[in-house]
Amino acid sequence: MIVPDEISVPERLYTWVDVDAHLADLAVRNQWPGWLHECDAFWDGVELTVDPSASRDEALSWLEEKFGVGSIARDEDVVAIRLDDVPGRLSTRMLPIEVRHQRPDLPRREPRWRERRIVRSLGQPLPPPEGPFPGNVRIAALHSFKGGVGRTLHGVALAEAISQRGERVLLVDADLEAPGITWMFTAHGRRVDFAYEDFLSLLHSSEDGRPDDAVTLGAAYLPNQTIGRVIAMPTRRTLQDIAPPRIQPTDLLTPERSIYYLTESLAQLADHLGARAVLIDLRAGGSELSAPVLLDPRVQRIFVTTVSDQSLIGTARIIQELGRRAPTRPEDPASAAVITQFHPQGHAELAIEAAAMLRDVIAKTLEPSPQGGEDRVVDGDVTLEPILSVFQDRLLALPSSWESVVELVHRQRLTKTLAPLADELSRPEETAYTPRPGSSVSPSGMNELAELRGRLGDFARRLAYAETADDTEFLTTESLRNLLTSHRTEPPLCVVAGAKGSGKTFTQIQMCLRRTWRDYAVDVGVPDVALQALLAPVFISKNLKDHQRISAIQRDACVSSEAEPASQLELRDRIDQALRAQLSDSEWRRVWLTCMARAVGIDAETSDVEQKLADFARDGSRIFLIDGLEDLLQDFARSEAQRQALRVLMVDCLDWLRSLRGRPLGLVIFVRRDLIQAAVRQNYNQFLARYSEYELKWNPAEALRLALWIAQRSGSLPGLSSEDVAKATDKDLSRQLTPVWGEKMGSARSREARSDGWFLAALSDFNGQIQARDIVIFIAESADLSMDDSRWSDRLLTPSAMRNALVKCSRQKIEAIGAESPQVGELLKRLDGLSAEKKKIPFSPEIVGLSGEDLDLLVANGVVFREEDQYWIPEIFRHGLSFKAAGRPKILAIANLVRQRNNLD
């Protein structure tokens, strides 16, 4: 239960109202005895309806137990509840008690905050509605505990965001006491022919319980109140009338109508208007004006609050009460929260803590899952993460007209802030995935499905390491496009940074296999690249096995057919010898340039290399490619000579090549980011920023595109072409990946997280980084583990296989980061060596024995995340370290909190 199981006796009983409230609280907490059916308190007495099997004395004894010793007065004339009087004086103020024996009728429960009859069933949720809204219309209601928190403004922004997605939306101003949208609309100079009060009145006057008149008249007049794709239904036709409404939503709750009559009628109206969504701006607080809408679990509840205690705690209490009265079911939309009016500089931590609190409160509003029902698994990850809308001065004083408000919304980018909500409300309602022809998994039997899974696993495994890659198509990323777009006619002179496993070696190989810069550009899909320079690998990864092919490419890049390129062994020896000598920066520059010259067959030594390269540059052009620097500089963390060598390569050598007239020679250096940080200690951020657009980073869309590309290239998705993958939008990616891993980490109607969101959160560190190698290994492992699973014939990768695949991915990730950063590796070894009882998340520093400096280092590397005074470990590290989560892991929730904090920093 959200509320405490037990409540104490009331502190004060002034009137029958206090008695009534206490009896209702007892019913809500299921603290009525089985024989008690109904309690009714009035100004002149209390009436208890009990089962015929119960005695009058039993009823009176129960009342005295619940109201306190001495609370019941008994004499021959009257039995009554003793009300409070002046302190110190025995009260003579009495509320008579009547006990009657009968079996009651089952009362009709209605969506009100304060129900008319106090009966046993108050402890149970309201009767759930049957089926979705008419026309599968989506309804969302914006509510706030307090006014002045930006609810109406964000309602307008959300309506505008939905309309930008090509959908019509019906925007209803249901704040019958303090309308806001109505003022904006009328100030815009628009005439109001049909208002919310008209709609309520027409519904109220319906004699057969059908909304036909209200829907017909509304559909006739409301199109005249359309701005863009937003159809506005103001509160009333004229703002001259400030009196309370004549008809309220609760007036529609008559016996012949559905208890969800209002929301179902609004859905019918929207359907007639061709609107996919309805947005309702509700009255603030615990008002009965809002109850019939909020208490329909099919309505997506959007709570708007600030970080102030009053607003936040009041909002949480409203959410808790909704969870008790009308919990969301598996088929209902997840509730959401919008936190407004905070400064990122001063209130960021407050906002993050508020988001965490609201996330947990909303997760508890889900309907409990029956035992063993996999399709009804309750998972807090499926709630929409609270949206943070930072304070902006211009929003303090809103303009009066609709047009001006919408212009301000766009200028302040509120539509982008509310994009997750707009995506949810504009997404077509689907009970099952409907693939486009040719893109789905449609095996005729389990043998064929196993074959498709086998293809996927084999192909992914070949891609897992660059040394097993071939000259197949490769996935174009934004960084590759940027590199080619910026160098259409001039050779690149740049550093391509990336973490271990980000694809540096793979990218170098794919460049080499295309032989020329222009041919590589053609395969990447960047047009108008005129540069025909040959690509010349200088250093390559020691792990590459196909050295014969690389040697052939090196010979092609030589200055002449007679020239012979230096071997990798010769070039490595030059670097080893230089590391043992004490060289100046200029001497190191010539060592690196000599390696480049020898790689294309120029017979040069450090004494004459600069002149020979300059002479060659007058007639020829080459683009040198360097990778595998971690093989050459294995002790860079402790060796100043190695750091110096790397710094000279990345700074001095590039500067020298830039100094050549016409810049005929290019150089692309593939290097791990941690090596850069060790070598370039001054102006490190400026150095990274200079080459940031070429950095091998995988944003969420590109990570999903890589997963889809692997499935398409493996032949596991017949009918899906490379062009489909390349041109897929973010929404297309999620849809096209459904046959790979399903819509959710369970059945389509389960409370499990969406598969694409789970995938991104599970493989990302707490810096939001996800590596290509982790993606490929994950898919290979998941495909292998899915081979014999016959329970999921609608997807290639099964939920259990995906979860179990994380274990191996996590272990390999820990090995990789240990090799990349020995300091981090040592801390991970310490965490791994803890006893099992200490391996729990979230953890406190004292339990695991880490200092503040240790934790800062882990935070900087995305290995831990601090929430209040405790620390979390991302899934990609947690499994390999064998840390257990307290309860069900909040994979998406924590990942979203990290993203929000990073956005605010």
Image (spheres, rainbow, N blue to C red):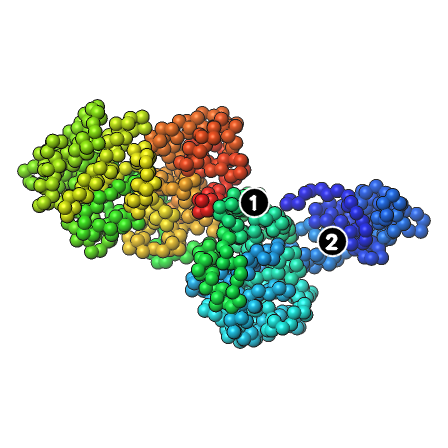
Quadrant in which the N terminus appears: top right
Quadrant in which the C terminus appears: top left
Q: Nearer the viewer, residue 743 or 596?
A: 596
Outermost residue toward the top in this view: 580
Relative to 554, does residue 312 appear above or below in the rendering?
below
Q: Is residue 758 left or right of residue 7?
A: left
Q: Which tag, 1 or 2, sits closer to the chain's start?
A: 2
Q: Residue 200's image quarter? A: bottom right
Tell me which amino acid carries mark 2: Val
* Residue 657 at least partly seen: yes
Q: Residue at x 85, y 57 (%)?
A: 44
Local crowd size for mark 2, using a 10 Å CA cut-off: few (<14), some (14–19), many (≥20): many
Local crowd size for mark 1, using a 10 Å CA cut-off: few (<14), some (14–19), many (≥20): some
Tell me which amino acid carries mark 1: Met
Mark 2 secondary-structure assignment: strand
- The image position of residue 463, as x and y in percent, is 29, 40
Relative to 570, does residue 903 appear above or below in the rendering?
below
* Residue highlighted by disc 2: 119
* Residue highlighted by disc 1: 357
Q: How many marks?
A: 2
- The image position of residue 841, as x and y in percent, is 51, 34
Q: Residue at x 73, y 45 (%)?
A: 31
* Residue 140 at least partly seen: no
Question: How far apart are labels 1 and 2 at the CA level?
Answer: 32 Å
Q: Residue at x 40, y 36 (%)?
A: 861
Outermost residue toward the left in this view: 562
Mark 1 secondary-structure assignment: helix
Q: Nearer the viewer, residue 155 or 593?
A: 593
- The mark lying in front, picked from 1 and 2, is 1
Q: Is residue 285 left or right of residue 794?
A: right
- The image position of residue 301, as x and y in percent, is 56, 55
Relative to 564, does residue 322 appear above or below in the rendering?
below
